[in-house]
Structure formats: C-alpha cells, structure tokens
Image: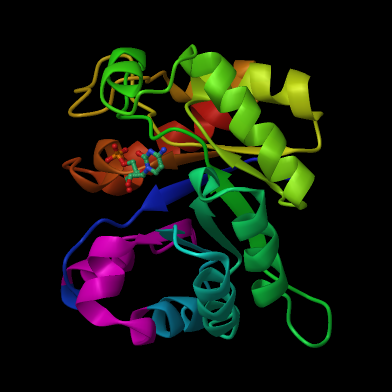
Amino acid sequence: MGKDVIIACDFDSKEKTLAFLDRFTEEKPFVKIGMELYYAEGPSIVKEIKARGHKIFLDLKLHDIPNTVKKSMAVLSRLDVDMTNLHAAGTIDMMKAALEGLTREDGTRPLLIAVTQLTSTSEERMQNELLINASINDTIVKYADNAKKAGLDGVVCSPLEAGMVKSACGKEFMTVTPGVRFADGEIGDQVRVTTPAKAKEIGSDYIVVGRPITASEDPVAAYRRCCNEFIG
Ligand code: C5P
C-alpha cells in the first residue's frame, strides 16, 4: 500500500478547481472531490479530473438505508473513481450493501472506506449531543471494527487515531487521515489534528490535506512540503 498525500479540492466551481490544478505542472496529485464541488458541478467534474490523469477520492460520505446506499454506490462505481466512502454510523448492514453496490460486474471496485467520527467532533460533543456513552477512542475503534467486519478497506480518522486503528484492525486495514496541519499553520475548525511528519510516524496510509495547501499562497510548495514530511 503506497503512502500518498490527497489534496482536498474544496472549491465551489469547476473553474476554480481546474485553475488550482493547472498550477501543478510537474506532479499529478491524488485529488479529493467532496460534497461542495460535486454538488456544484455534478459527475462531469469527476470525469474531467480523471481524464487529466489524477487519482480521485470521491468523498460523499453516504449515510442512508442499505438499499439506497447500495444503488447509489452502483451509480458512483461507474465514475471510475479510485476511492469513495460512507459513514460507519450507518451500520454493518449498510456498509455491506454499499460494497455490493460498488462492485462492478467484472469484480473490480474502488476502495471503500468508512468515516468513524468526523475529525471536527470532540469527545465532549459526541457524548453530550450524540449521547454516545463511551470514549471517542473506543467509539472509533468499534466503528473501525464494524467497517472491517463488513469487508471495507479501511477508515477515515484523525491521524492521532491511526495507530490504535491499526492495532485493533491490522496493519493492512487502511487509515486515511484528514485533520493535518503544518506545525506553524492555522487549525481552523478541525479539532483532532497533527502534522504530516507525525501522521507518518503514527502510521497513516494517506493524509487528506485541504486548506494548508488550497489556501496557501504557493500551493505547489505547500503540497511538496506535505509530501516531503509525509512520504520522505
Ligand atoms: O481544509 P482541511 O485540511 O481541514 O480539509 C480536510 C478535508 O477532509 C475536508 O474536505 C473535510 O470535509 C474532510 N474530512 C474531515 N474529517 C473527516 C472526514 C473528512 O476533515 N473525518
């Protein structure tokens, strides 16, 4: 499993996204397309970025009844993305249904990972607002184990949790980790964050980096800094 830096392209239009990607003349970064861009531009933006040669993580975080998720995943699998995701909170049945929907007739499918708890959620809010009467770490490990039982490839979690997920689910079980900030950068609305270098040390397979690259004055330099710290 190759380690890589995935850039979260959280833009609201095709023009802004392509202008951003045009700045990368030497590299073809792995790109994350999330809800903002997908809802603004639809499936054509996925096809266009794919045609430019980028790998794509389609981050739509599905969470609905199993039948709806299965059918939606079947549609998404035709977009030829490399990775997609859902919320583990949808239960093991929903995750199994998603995997079935995602698998193409020839048996191939994009990687499927589950969100455990969003990296913007603190333990206090999880307990007080969601009434989950457990520690955030136990909740994350339990959700990761559910995802593994359903046959998924890994989870999205904070880099701070990658080590404990690997210990519980095995080192082949992928950890894709947003919530990454440079040591000298802004945290923004993220709560459970760490640096690319520390994420590497803890064992993340992929880091997902948005604003530290997209809002940087020199995104290419920021991307290279991430790659240097994370991949070496
Ligand atoms: O700008 P920033 O680096 O905070 O972007 C992180 C990206 O990762 C955003 O697109 C956000 O939606 C996504 N994400 C997250 N936490 C999760 C799952 C996805 O921050 N648990």
Is 107 within the magenta? no
Specify whether 232 is left or right of 184: right
Residue 32 belongs to the span the image colors magenta: yes
Q: Say which quarter of the image contains residue 183.
A: top left
Q: Quadrant of ligand 1?
A: top left
Asked if one can make out residue 37 in the rendered structure from this viewpoint, the answer is: yes
Say whether residue 1 is visible: no
Provide the residue span drawn in magenta. 16-45
Q: What residue is rendered at 50% in x and 64% in y?
A: 65
Q: Is residue 221 left or right of residue 13?
A: right
Left or right: where 82 falls relative to 222? right
The quarter of the displayed image where residue 210 is located: top left
Q: Residue at the spot x=36%, y=15% of the render?
A: 123
Q: Position of residue 159 (x, y in %)?
A: 51, 24
**Percent position of residue 95, x then y:** 63, 56
Which residue is at 50% across, 74% downward? 68
**Observer-nearest residue: 44 or 97?**
97
